[in-house]
């Protein structure tokens, strides 16, 4: 087994997680220029150790981390003034301003300045010469509270244009790397660059973070392994991650060679956010199939159990900044542009359809154009009337695929215009030059219908912007010649494969690959009655206006606070190397069983009771050959030869199976079928702990189980003397779990009047007589020893699943009773870190066997010669 490093992190101060609005420390100072300490708080006189009653004393602090800062940089010309504007800052060679279109800036504005301080960590879009980096860093920290991360050009290229854009981005948009031409093949050098950049980001964050107070919110797939570096340094860091792209199905994600590294890194966050349930479901499925993790919904919150920590899953699409968009709608430039477009299109009897997309392979621009071509062919009445204005934003990536999309788009536009155009009329107007935001908003205002037909997109806020723009204002209503109090209308044709689709129930949803269906959707959108368009618009406007970027940000941060609430009440250890690092978080009363502790107790005591589960405890669950190894047999025999010990194997297996497997263990006590059968040594007769069971119920249960076995590949039925077990250990985990739930309900229904209990385990459903459980054996063992007058002063009970919890309960409740010696050493131990009635845990079966070997060595050492 690979050795593990254990670093006890208990020295970190504990305390309740502060709720938003109660934090008392300012942002720490960071070194920006050699010999100059810059404070990031609004008050330049305030330091990290300032008096808590200062103006920022009650503000929370949020560190937002993303690939790019919400900053626009402009290089100065020789004639430029060195002064900076009111909302910007500058240095000798650069001028900086906020990027008002950045979601990260809108997020800050929506949260409100009174409630929280925001600090940004990220890269600039422009390359800064090393000679300017210190000065630029100082300006950005002091003026914008932005901490820039400067990366060498080659490293950034391999990280961003290499691994992020050539591999992760296509894969997360469901494109398999079948050939180098289709998408980037995995490149180990690019992956190493990705990890290195994430490490650099972590180092930058560590310069400014107050680990016990600050909340950290990481954004998007560029920084998916960053949580590991932060958790490794500060195990109680309050850490959220939001993925703005799709998350692919497990079949796609499995092709990523570093798939487990990325999953484990994300699980070092406290809260992971997704735009849609589909993306979250895919992520959970990957965690289940590749890491064997289980998840459940508790009071409406989905949680993954990961080494004692509960990683919460958030599902909420991002919204738009209502205030910013409405202010743009009020601009005189917008009004002038709207008037111009009305003159250009509406006054000439044209109906504008609008598309706004990035020029990349996933936005489906060519498919949209083909659908328009089909519409004009099938419905000649729209020729000369319908105009598709396609705004093509510059692609964010580079490469051959972008050039191919551009070439195909231009050729298709040219063909359609040549076929259906006429003097003064082109059915397609392609705008591939950058537009200012107010210009784009003007197109939204005038367009009769917005077409968003991407073949795969994370969220896409274009439909939201369109809806708010169509709502307009009084001045725009006059320009559009609308009567006061006129009900507004809008129409949307959206792809099923974009993140905003589930929230737009009034849109016409389409499969963008089905060109005929998209053409029909366009026709439907044009033909719908005015009242229908108005109703759809009202429904959308109500949702979009109430679920804006502020709603999204506040909801995420509230869930992050809730997810981190018990940080101070847990004991934590860091385990593992590199990207396999994770934190084990345990309740104060639940701790790892120390070899030194139990060996010391073992040596001191004279009457010992040892109860051991078999499957999952002495034998790994996934083993094909379930027979005990020669080493295990030798350990058990050594323990049994010690006259101070009474050793029990307690298993769900049948007595014939256990008799065969442990034939070499003469003095070993065995409890079979959860304790229904009991034998104190090999030569003894089998006893029954409960009266003889009537198993006529098997005639009812077995046909039901057989039905599920036939329909669930990999499942089996085990027929024991008193029980029936349906196992789905080798079936597909998701389907097997679904079938197990259905089988459990089915069996409980048909066996309602039978004296049996139906229980579900991790990979099985079992029917057994009522009152039979492993707790019977624990109670029987203690009462037998009490009857002999030999009260045990050492009790060790180890198990791994739900059925063993009955043993733990009996053992722990007997501590104060007459069946155990006063001041006895009692060890109830479960396998793995999970909620349990046991007080101790060990990581896996390897550690269990090592522990038993240690106890056997003590017995050997003190055995009489």
Image (tube, helix red, strand yellow):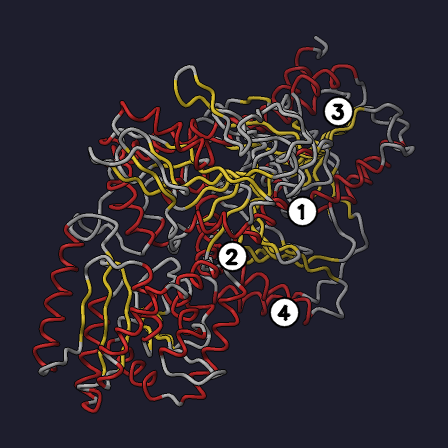
Question: Do the residues bearing badges 3 and 4 touch, measured as CB atoms within 8 Å?
Answer: no
Q: Quadrant of the C terminus?
A: top right
Q: Give the distance between the C-alpha atoms of the residues marked 4 and 2, in whole angstroms.
A: 32 Å
The residue indicated by pointer 2 is 315
Decide: few, some or many residues near mark 2? Use Cα within 10 Å; few <14, some 14-19, many ≥20.
some
Answer with mark 3 or mark 2, whichever residue precedes in sequence. 2
Residue situated in front as seen by the camera: 612 or 174: 174
| Residue 382 image position (x, y, % from top left) | 22, 87
Taking 408 as reference, is 353 left or right? right
Q: Residues within 10 Å of mark 4 (few under 14, many from 20)?
A: some
Task: Give the mark, 1 or 3, whose residue is nearer the N terminus.
Answer: 3
C-alpha distance separating marks 3 and 2: 54 Å
Q: Name the residue at the top extreme.
A: 865
Is there CB contact under 8 Å for labels 4 and 2? Answer: no
Judge left or right: residue 402 versus residue 723: left
Residue picked out by circle 1: 802
Select label 2 or label 1 by which is in front.
Answer: 2
Q: Position of residue 562 (x, y in %)?
A: 64, 46
Q: Is residue 266 left or right of residue 81?
A: right
Is disc 2 placed on a helix, strand or loop? strand
Q: Are marks 1 and 3 in contact (CB under 8 Å)?
A: no
- Residue 645: numbered disc: 3
Q: Position of residue 782 (x, y in %)?
A: 83, 35
Question: Badge 1: few (under 14), some or many (20 or more) residues near its Cα, within 10 Å?
Answer: some
């Amino acid at each position: 087994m690979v050795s593990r490093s254990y670093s006890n992190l208990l020295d970190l101060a504990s305390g309740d997680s502060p709720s938003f609005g109660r934090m008392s420390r300012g942002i720490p100072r960071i070194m920006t220029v050699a010999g100059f300490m810059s404070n990031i708080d609004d008050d330049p006189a305030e330091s990290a150790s300032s008096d808590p009653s200062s103006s920022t004393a009650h503000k929370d602090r949020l560190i937002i981390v993303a690939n790019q800062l919400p900053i626009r940089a402009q290089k100065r010309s020789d004639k430029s003034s060195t002064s900076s504007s009111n909302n910007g800052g500058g240095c000798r060679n650069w001028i900086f301003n906020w990027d008002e279109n950045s979601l990260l800036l809108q997020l800050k504005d929506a949260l409100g300045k009174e409630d929280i301080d925001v600090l940004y960590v990220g890269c600039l879009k422009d390359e800064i010469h090393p000679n300017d980096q210190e000065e630029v860093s100082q300006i950005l920290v002091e003026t914008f509270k932005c901490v820039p991360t400067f990366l060498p050009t080659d490293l950034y290229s391999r990280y961003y244009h290499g691994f992020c854009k050539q591999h992760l981005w296509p894969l997360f948009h469901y494109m398999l790397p079948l050939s180098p031409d289709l998408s980037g093949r995995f490149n180990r050098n690019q992956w190493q660059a990705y990890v290195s950049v994430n490490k650099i980001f972590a180092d930058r964050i560590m310069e400014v973070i107050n680990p016990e107070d600050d909340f950290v919110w990481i954004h998007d797939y560029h920084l998916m392994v960053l949580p590991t570096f932060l958790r490794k340094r500060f195990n109680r860091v309050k850490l959220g991650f939001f993925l703005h792209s799709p998350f692919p199905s497990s079949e796609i994600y499995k092709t990523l060679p570093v798939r487990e590294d990325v999953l484990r890194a994300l699980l070092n966050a406290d809260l992971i956010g997704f735009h849609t349930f589909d993306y979250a479901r895919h992520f959970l499925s990957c965690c289940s199939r590749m890491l064997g993790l289980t998840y459940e919904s508790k009071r409406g919150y989905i949680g993954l159990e990961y080494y004692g920590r509960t990683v919460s899953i958030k599902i909420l699409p991002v919204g738009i900044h209502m205030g910013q968009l409405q202010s743009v709608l009020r601009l005189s430039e917008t009004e002038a542009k709207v008037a111009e477009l009305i003159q250009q299109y509406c006054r000439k009897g044209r109906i504008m359809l609008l598309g706004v997309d990035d020029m990349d392979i996933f936005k489906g621009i060519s498919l949209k154009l083909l659908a328009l071509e089909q519409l004009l062919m099938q419905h000649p009445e729209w020729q000369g009337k319908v105009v598709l204005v396609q705004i093509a934003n510059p692609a964010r990536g580079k490469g051959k695929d972008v050039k191919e999309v551009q070439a195909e788009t231009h050729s298709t536009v040219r063909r359609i215009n040549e076929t259906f155009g006429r003097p003064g009329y082109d059915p397609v107007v392609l705008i591939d030059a950058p537009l200012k935001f107010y210009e784009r908003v003007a197109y939204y205002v005038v367009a009769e219908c917005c077409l968003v037909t991407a073949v795969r997109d994370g969220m896409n806020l274009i439909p939201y912007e369109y809806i708010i723009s169509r709502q307009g204002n009084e001045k725009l209503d006059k320009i559009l010649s609308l009567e006061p109090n006129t009900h507004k209308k809008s129409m949307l044709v959206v792809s099923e494969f974009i993140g905003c689709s589930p929230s737009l129930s009034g849109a016409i949803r389409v499969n963008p690959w089905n060109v005929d269906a998209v053409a029909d959707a366009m026709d439907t959108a044009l033909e719908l009655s005015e009242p229908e368009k108005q109703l759809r618009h009202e429904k959308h406007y109500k949702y979009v206006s109430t679920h804006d970027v502020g709603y999204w940000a506040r909801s995420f941060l509230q869930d992050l606070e809730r997810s981190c609430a018990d940080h101070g009440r847990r004991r934590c250890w860091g385990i593992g190397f590199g990207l396999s690092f994770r934190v084990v978080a345990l309740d104060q009363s639940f701790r790892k069983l120390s070899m030194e502790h139990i060996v010391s107790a073992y040596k001191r005591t004279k009457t010992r009771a040892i109860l051991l589960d078999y499957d999952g405890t002495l034998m790994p669950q996934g083993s094909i050959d379930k027979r005990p190894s020669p080493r295990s047999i030798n350990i058990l025999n050594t323990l049994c030869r010690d006259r101070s010990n009474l050793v029990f194997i307690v298993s769900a297996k049948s007595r014939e199976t256990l008799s065969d497997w442990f034939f070499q263990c003469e003095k070993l006590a065995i409890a079979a079928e959860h304790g229904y059968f009991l034998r104190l040594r090999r030569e003894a007769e089998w006893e029954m702990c409960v009266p003889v069971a009537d198993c006529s119920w098997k005639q009812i249960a077995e046909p039901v189980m057989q039905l599920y076995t036939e329909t669930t590949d990999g499942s089996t039925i085990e027929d024991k003397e008193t029980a029936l077990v349906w196992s789905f250990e080798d079936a597909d985990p998701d389907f097997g779990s679904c079938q197990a739930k259905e089988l459990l309900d089915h069996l409980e229904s048909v066996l309602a009047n039978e004296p049996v209990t139906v229980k579900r385990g991790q990979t099985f459903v079992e029917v057994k007589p009522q009152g039979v459980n492993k707790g019977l054996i624990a109670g029987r063992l203690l009462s037998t020893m009490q009857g002999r007058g030999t009260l045990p002063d050492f009790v060790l009970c180890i198990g791994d699943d739900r059925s063993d919890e009955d043993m733990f309960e009996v053992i722990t409740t007997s501590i104060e009773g007459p069946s155990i010696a006063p001041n006895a050493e009692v060890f109830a131990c479960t396998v793995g870190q999970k909620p349990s009635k046991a007080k101790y845990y060990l990581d896996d079966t390897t550690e269990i066997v090592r522990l038993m070997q240690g106890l056997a060595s003590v017995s050997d050492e003190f055995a009489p010669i």
